[in-house]
Every structure is written in C-alpha cells, then in structure tokens.
Image (spheres, rainbow, N blue to C red):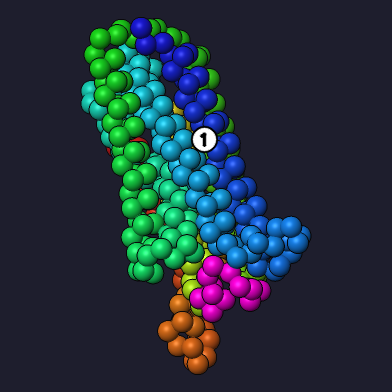
C-alpha cells in the first residue's frame, strides 16, 4: 500500500539531506580556496614544502573527488525524490480536496525536469568535478593542453549519464508500484501539514542556495587575490596561472550565479503554488512587490553582475593586453536588470498558468 505519511516524510528527508550536502559542497570549495592561496603564498612548513611543486594537482584532486562524490549523492537523492514524487502524485489522484493535475500526473512527475532544483544543484556539483578534472590533467602534463577540456567534459557527461540512469531506474520502479499497489487514505489535515512543511522547506532551500552561491563566489574572489602570488616553481607556470586563472575563476563564478538564479526562481514558483494550495486568496505571484524572497534574489543578481564583470575584464585583458580597461558599468546594470526582469516575468507566467488549471 502507498502510504501518505511514509511518502511525505521521505520527501522532507530527501530535501533536508540535499540542503546539508549543498552546504558541505560550498564549504569544501571555500576551504580549498584558502588551501590554494596558502600554497601559492609559500606558507607551508618546511616538512611540506615538496607539496608546492604539485600545487594545482593537489588542489584539483582534493576538489574533484568530493565534488564528484557529492554530485553522485545528489543524483541518488534526486532518484529518491523522483520515486516519492510519483507516489505522491498518485496519492493526490485519490483525494477530493487536492489538485489532481490530470490523469497523467504520475508520468509527468517521472520526467527529467531540467529546471528542477535537484537537477540544477547536481549540475553545479558535476561542473565543479569536471573543472577540477580538467585542471588535474593540466597540472600533471601527461597530455596536450587541449585534451584537458575534453577530459573535463567527459567527467561531466559521465556524471550526467549516471544521473539519468538513477532517475530512470527510480521512475520505472515507482510507475510499476503505482500500477499494483493501492493508495492509503488520509485526511485533509495531514495534507495541509505536509504543504505547510513544504513551504518551510522551500524557504530554507532558497537560503541554502544563496549561501552556496555566496561561498563559491567569495571564495573565488579570495582565489583571485592569491593568483598574483603564483611566482613559485609549481606544476603550472606562474605566467599561465596569471593569464588563464582569472578567466577560469570568472567563468566559474558567472556559471555558479546563473545556476543559482534559475534555482531561486524555480523555488519561488514552487512556494507560490504551495501558498495558493493553502490559501486560494493569496497572491504570491503578484509582481513588483518588495518581499523577503525578492531581496534575496536581488542579492544573487548583484553577485551575478559582479561575476560577469570580472569574467569580461579577464577575457578582454587576454584579447587586448595593451588596451584600456573597458567601461562595464552599463553591462553590469543591464545584467542586473535582466535578471530581475526574468524573475518578475517568471512569476507572472506562473500565476497565469496556475489560474488556468
């Protein structure tokens, strides 16, 4: 029998574990940024001085292994969320007081949602693993430099394939179960309690996403300040580090902020839907309201504009070494405005879609 209490508790357990993993991922990246800066600054004791000759190999390995394992754990958690999401959709079809979302709701819940929080957070961890794999190949110098991006892409795609495999495996099991197991009954009070808990989980997830992006971005800032100290005899020459390091960090910061923006919007929409399920008279999708959620999103948008600024400056300096620094304030303002406009437009579209149901 498909039991509502067991399904709802498992969903909340998966969400809680995912938040802890994301916090750990940000902490790993921040701590390794300090480790790299100390290596480049020659701050190690004499007994560990030999490690300086393998600075970037050590950094890449210490980043790649945790990122890859965390990405796989996030993929497994997504499988658990998919399984229980399908069972939850089936349970909703048996009740008179819930939104049934059509007879094909369980099969729609089985699809891969590329804008879902689980997928986006997995992609971020998987990208870090691919980035570290490419850096590791560059540092050990066993292949030509152009092979490093290929290896990084291969690691990312391998993680993505495993994600899809776990997802399909969980969906097949859940769809088979809803075809043979009956649904248990439950009251409206238990459903409303679950929706209220989902609202709380959604707000905590937004804070977690903001903290994760902030950890990665500000750790990257610290890493940028350490690149100027790269004058030791390391496994990647100081000239290469100072030429390509800012570009790599700028790109990583920009991608991280972009993924964070999309994830935050997805969470805001989900929270709005849950709010309307509890109170149909609520207006969570009304635009141009200075809410706590909007202020958090504005902080993410600001970090995105700053990250894009650093990335463009680094690329411009590489293309035009003797040129003047371009004026990018207009670009920064445009990036910030586009991010805010995208969020507000998403709320309007989500509100109209919900009213049409």
Residue stretch in magenta: 228-241
Toward the right, the furthest residue is 45
Asked whether residue 171 is in view, the answer is: yes
Which residue is identified by label 1? 18
- Residue 348 position in % (x across, y down): 39, 49
Q: How many marks?
A: 1
Magenta segment: does it hold 319?
Answer: no
Looking at the rendered image, the quarter that the C terminus falls into is top left
Asked whether residue 333 is in view, the answer is: no
Looking at the rendered image, the quarter that the N terminus falls into is top left
Q: Nearer the viewer, residue 236 or 248?
A: 236
Q: Provide the major secondary structure of the magenta segment.
A: loop
- Report whether 112 appears left or right of 59: left
Answer with the quarter of the image where residue 113 lies. top left
Seen at 29% across and 14% down, the residue is 177
As drawn, 282 above or below 341: above
As drawn, 199 above or below 71: above
Q: Nearer the viewer, residue 243 or 95?
A: 243
Q: Nearer the viewer, residue 297 or 236?
A: 236
Seen at 58% across and 69% down, the residue is 234
- Residue 31 position in % (x across, y down): 65, 52
As drawn, 266 above or below 187: below
Seen at 51% across and 76% down, the residue is 240
- Residue 120 position in % (x across, y down): 42, 46
Q: Residues within 10 Å of mark 1 (few under 14, many from 20)?
A: many
* Element carrying mark 1: helix
- Report whether 126 appears left or right of 235: left
Answer with the quarter of the image where residue 350 lies. top left
Seen at 50% across and 14% down, the residue is 189
């Amino acid at each position: 029998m498909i039991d509502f209490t067991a399904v709802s508790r498992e969903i909340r357990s998966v969400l809680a574990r995912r938040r802890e993993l994301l916090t750990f991922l940000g902490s790993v990246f921040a701590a390794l940024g300090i480790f790299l800066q100390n290596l480049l600054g020659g701050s190690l004791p004499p007994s560990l001085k030999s490690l300086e000759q393998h600075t970037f190999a050590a950094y890449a390995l210490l980043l790649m292994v945790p990122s890859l394992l965390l990405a796989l754990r996030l993929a497994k958690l997504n499988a658990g969320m998919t399984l229980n999401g399908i069972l939850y959709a089936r349970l909703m079809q048996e009740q008179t007081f819930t939104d049934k979302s059509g007879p094909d709701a369980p099969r729609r819940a089985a699809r891969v949602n590329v804008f879902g929080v689980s997928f986006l957070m997995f992609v971020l961890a998987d990208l870090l693993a691919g980035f570290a794999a490419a850096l590791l190949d560059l540092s050990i110098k066993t292949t030509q430099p152009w092979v490093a991006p290929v290896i990084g892409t291969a690691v990312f795609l391998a993680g993505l394939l495993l994600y899809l495999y776990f997802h399909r495996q969980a969906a097949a099991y859940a769809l088979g179960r809803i075809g043979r197991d009956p649904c248990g009954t439950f009251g409206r009070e238990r459903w409303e309690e679950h929706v209220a808990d989902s609202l709380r989980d959604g707000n905590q997830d937004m804070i977690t996403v903001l903290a994760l992006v902030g950890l990665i971005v500000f750790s990257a800032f610290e890493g940028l300040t350490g690149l100027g100290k790269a004058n030791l005899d390391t496994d990647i020459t100081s000239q290469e580090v100072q030429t390509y390091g800012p570009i790599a960090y700028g790109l990583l910061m920009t991608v991280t902020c972009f993924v964070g923006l999309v994830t935050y919007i997805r969470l805001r929409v989900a929270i709005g839907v849950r709010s309307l399920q509890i109170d149909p008279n609520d207006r969570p999708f009304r635009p141009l309201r200075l809410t706590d959620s909007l202020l958090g999103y504005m902080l993410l948008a600001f970090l995105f504009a700053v990250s894009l600024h650093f990335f463009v400056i680094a690329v411009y300096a590489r293309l035009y070494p003797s040129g003047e620094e371009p004026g990018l304030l207009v670009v920064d303002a445009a990036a910030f405005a586009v991010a805010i406009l995208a969020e507000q437009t998403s709320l309007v579209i989500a509100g109209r879609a919900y009213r049409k149901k």
